[in-house]
Image (cartoon, rainbow, N blue to C red):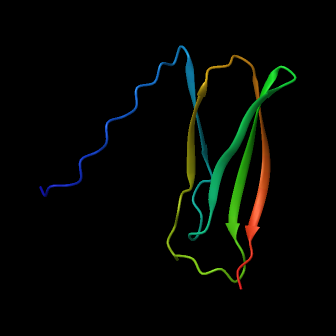
Amino acid sequence: MGKGLALPELPKIDFSREMIVMLALGTRPSGGYGIIVDKAYLRVGRLEKVVRKESPGRNCSVTMELTKPVDVVRLPKIDREVVFREKEIVHSCK
């Protein structure tokens, strides 16, 4: 078996004080797609997260391989309702 790259050490997470949020778009037909947590804030007793979903425009040059965009964020633990607000962005390329 050949030598591979060493994996980085996983971050230490105290789940009594922190939480992890993972967003995934699932399989996409090409590159140029993305999902990002832009913001997270408390509002009227709940945690709101602004999520930006990106996709390539019609004339964009992208890799023609399947992709699986994800974003993972670490936040202080909050025992409240979570609401996701989505913004969809289609990049225009010329």
Residue 28 or residue 89, whichever sits in front? 89
77 to the left or right of 65: right
Query: Compared to 55, does 64 lie above or below?
Result: below
Farthest top residue? Answer: 16
Farthest right residue? Answer: 44
Who's the residue at 71% across and 86% down the image?
94
Who's the residue at 83% across and 19% down the image?
45
The quadrant of the picture occupied by the N terminus is: bottom left
- In percent of width and height, residue 39 lies at 72, 40
Q: Please tell me how many numbered marks the rendered image carries.
A: 0
- In percent of width and height, residue 71 lies at 57, 46
Residue 14 or residue 82, whichever sits in front? 14
- In percent of width and height, residue 30 lies at 57, 71
- In percent of width and height, residue 20 lies at 56, 31
Who's the residue at 56% across and 56% down the image?
69
Q: Quadrant of residue 2?
A: bottom left
Who's the residue at 40% across and 31% down the image?
11
Query: Compared to 69, does 72 lie above or below?
Result: above
26 to the left or right of 46: left
Farthest left residue? Answer: 1
